[in-house]
Image (spheres, rainbow, N blue to C red):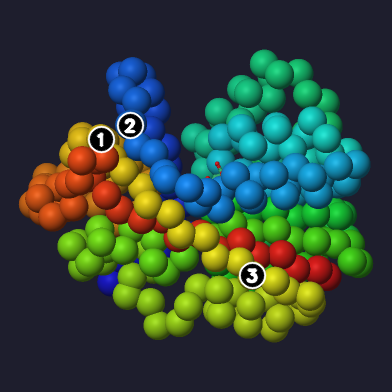
């Protein structure tokens, strides 16, 4: 059984190292989605909700979005367990000279903040709802009536890739991600929970572009460029269209209150 990415910091260090290698080599992935895939909607909602509030960004990665939030928030704290990602986030912070942001190397299931420190907790494809403990921590650090906004990967994301590989981030899943999230959040005390699903087509220009994505994100657990070469070739054989090599995205957006 492949390890889930939230169990293993090393998986993320390797993914960020692969991304840094790609950037250093100057190669840029060519992919695009048709119609709104939920990501822009999520960003818009977070930026609107952050105005004048104390915000925590759980699984902030390299901090690009955390710093965008800071432009309208009162304060923002970004946490992530990847040393590589946080190093990049701190470099960004220094070059932007923003004073209402802090970054902390920490796990989502052990947040380094006192209870009731924030008005808004956000997690953009991050670990806030990965485990009972991480949901409990998000709940603990929120003030009464505080809000949580999550963007999660849905069970149908990259469905045709998961079928060819026989494995995927959530594949095969037993329950809908949205149903599971609603239940887990309610169990930890969240209320007024609402869930929305977004699906879109995504296209990759060439096999090389698919390989880049597979090397820098946890879409296929234990992806190995050599061992999985046949799978990637099969994807190109089966799903090449005049617009590019087709797959799909599935995002679940969640809002809840403490
Ligand atoms: C898909 S990336 C998203 C990064 C960022 N939110 C963004 O939208 O660009 C997920 C991030 O969560 C972090 N992460 C995963 N599990 C974690 C955990 N248990 N505790 C803290 N960070 C975690 C990873 O290191 C990674 O930076």
Q: Does the image show residue 86?
A: yes
Q: Relative to 102, does residue 157 appear above or below in the rendering?
A: below
Name the residue: 17% across, 46% down: 240
SS at mark 2 in the image: loop
Name the residue: 28% across, 71% down: 1
Q: Position of residue 26 (x, y in %)?
A: 33, 18
Q: Position of residue 147 (x, y in %)?
A: 80, 61
Name the residue: 75% across, 68% down: 256
Spatial CA distance of label 1 from label 2 is 6 Å
- Is ligand 1 less than 8 Å from the beta carbon at label 2? no
Q: Earlier in the sequence, mark 3 or mark 1?
A: 3
Residue assigned mark 2: 30
Residue assigned mark 3: 195
Q: Position of residue 253 (x, y in %)?
A: 61, 61
SS at mark 1 in the image: loop
Query: Is 121 in front, or is 47?
Result: 47
Residue assigned mark 1: 205
Name the residue: 22% across, 66% down: 163
Q: Earlier in the sequence, mark 1 or mark 2?
A: 2
Q: Does the image show residue 75?
A: no
Crowd band around label 1 with a 10 angstrom C-alpha radius: few (<14), some (14–19), many (20+): some
Residue 180, quarter of the rendered image: bottom right
User: Pointer 1 and pointer 2: residues touching (CB < 8 Å)?
Assistant: yes
Query: Is 81 in front, or is 34?
Result: 34
Query: Is 161 in front, or is 112?
Result: 161
Spatial CA distance of label 3 from label 1 is 32 Å
């Amino acid at each position: 059984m492949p390890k889930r990415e939230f169990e293993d910091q090393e998986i993320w260090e390797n993914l960020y190292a692969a991304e840094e290698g790609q950037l250093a080599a100057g190669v840029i992935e060519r992919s695009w989605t048709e119609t709104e895939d939920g990501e822009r909607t999520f960003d818009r909602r977070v930026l609107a909700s952050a105005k004048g509030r104390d915000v925590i960004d759980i699984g902030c990665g390299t901090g690009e979005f955390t710093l965008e939030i800071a432009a309208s928030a009162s304060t923002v704290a970004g946490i992530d367990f990847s040393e590589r990602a946080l190093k990049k986030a701190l470099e960004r912070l220094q070059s932007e000279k923003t004073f209402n942001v802090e970054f902390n190397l920490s796990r989502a299931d052990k947040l380094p903040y006192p209870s009731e420190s924030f008005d808004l907790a956000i997690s953009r494809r991050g670990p806030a709802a990965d485990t009972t403990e991480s949901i409990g921590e998000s709940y603990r650090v929120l003030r009464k009536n505080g809000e949580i906004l999550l963007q999660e990967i849905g069970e149908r994301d990259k469905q045709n890739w998961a079928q060819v590989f026989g494995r995927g981030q959530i594949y095969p899943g037993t329950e809908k991600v949205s149903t599971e999230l609603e239940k887990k959040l309610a169990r930890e005390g969240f209320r007024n929970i609402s869930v929305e699903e977004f699906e879109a087509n995504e296209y990759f220009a060439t096999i090389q572009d698919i390989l880049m994505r597979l090397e820098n994100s946890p879409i296929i657990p234990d992806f190995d460029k050599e061992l999985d070469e046949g799978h990637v070739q099969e994807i190109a054989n089966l799903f090449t269209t005049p617009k590019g090599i087709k797959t799909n995205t599935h995002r679940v957006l969640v809002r809840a209150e403490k």
